[in-house]
Image (cartoon, grey):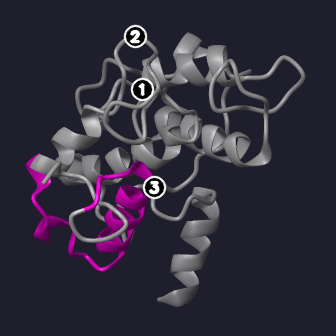
């Protein structure tokens, strides 16, 4: 009903379950079988305009891990709108970002369905712990889970679109694939081996 996916029928939509459903549907080439406008609407409403980060459910606070769960799902969904702009390949994300060309004025560059600069700001300014690692939000402590998914969300926001917050290479992370959440060069090698 909300547009996202829950853990069981008629349960509240949740970012983690929604990402898993979207990624699984994409792997089966069935993503277009769902109500895309409702899914898109639910996902884009999870990015909070003040903080810039994502909440996992309606009426909840921003949590850094949803940088990937919601951001990754939106990157996958964005591929439906970017199909005409992506070179034909076995995988549409392998060429979405050319690291040697940071021209953000190019009209053929892919776009994301969320404000990637706002998400990067949240991760870099709010989710980082002064002693290293990343966290849910400023009042929380760092942990491996939130470090992983904040960094994964940072990668999606930097490499699936064209915008990097501050345009600095210091805060850049490697490009990961939004479906598999592993480095794109590894996905490319894996797909070449399986063909």
Circle number at residue 50: 2
Residue 153 drawn at (x, y percent): 54, 40
Q: Position of residue 1 (x, y in %)?
A: 12, 54
Q: In the rendered image, which residue does mark 3 sit on?
A: 16
Position of 40 relative to 126 (above/below): below
Please state which of the two labelled residues, at mark 1 or mark 2, is closer to the viewer. Answer: 2
Q: How many marks?
A: 3
Q: Position of residue 111 (x, y in %)?
A: 29, 34
Q: CA distance from mark 1 to mark 2?
A: 14 Å
Q: Earlier in the sequence, mark 3 or mark 1?
A: 3
Query: Which of the 4 image quarters holds residue 97?
Result: top left
Write the start and end of the magenta stretch as one range. Answer: 11-37
Q: Earlier in the sequence, mark 2 or mark 3?
A: 3
Q: Quadrant of residue 59?
A: top left
Q: Circle 2 — which element?
A: loop
Marks 2 and 3, Cα distance to the nearest angstrom? Answer: 22 Å
Question: Which quadrant would residue 126 be assigned to in this image?
Answer: top right
Residue 98 appears in the picture as rendered: no
Q: 135 or 154: which is nearer to us?
A: 135
Q: Earlier in the sequence, mark 1 or mark 2?
A: 2
Instruction: Using the rendered image of the protein, determine whether residue 106 is visible from the camera's viewpoint.
Output: yes
- Looking at the picture, tell me which residue is in the foreground, 129 or 172: 129
Query: For mark 1, what is the residue?
Result: 116
């Amino acid at each position: 009903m909300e547009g996202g996916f829950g853990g069981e029928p008629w349960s509240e939509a949740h970012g983690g379950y929604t990402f898993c459903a979207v990624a699984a549907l994409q792997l089966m080439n069935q993503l277009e079988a769902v109500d895309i406008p409702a899914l898109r609407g639910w996902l884009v409403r999870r990015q909070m305009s003040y903080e810039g980060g994502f909440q996992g459910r309606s009426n909840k606070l921003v949590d850094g891990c949803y940088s990937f769960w919601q951001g990754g799902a939106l990157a996958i969904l964005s591929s439906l709108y970017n199909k005409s702009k992506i070179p034909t390949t076995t995988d549409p994300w392998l060429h979405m970002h050319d690291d040697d060309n940071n021209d953000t004025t190019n009209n053929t560059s892919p776009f994301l369905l969320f404000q990637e600069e706002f998400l990067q700001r949240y991760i870099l300014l709010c989710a980082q712990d002064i002693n290293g690692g990343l966290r849910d939000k400023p009042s929380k402590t760092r942990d491996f889970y939130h470090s992983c998914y904040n960094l994964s969300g940072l990668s999606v926001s930097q490499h699936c679109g064209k915008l990097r917050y501050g345009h600095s290479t210091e805060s850049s992370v490697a490009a990961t694939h939004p479906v598999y959440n592993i480095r794109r060069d590894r996905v490319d090698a894996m797909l070449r081996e399986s063909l």
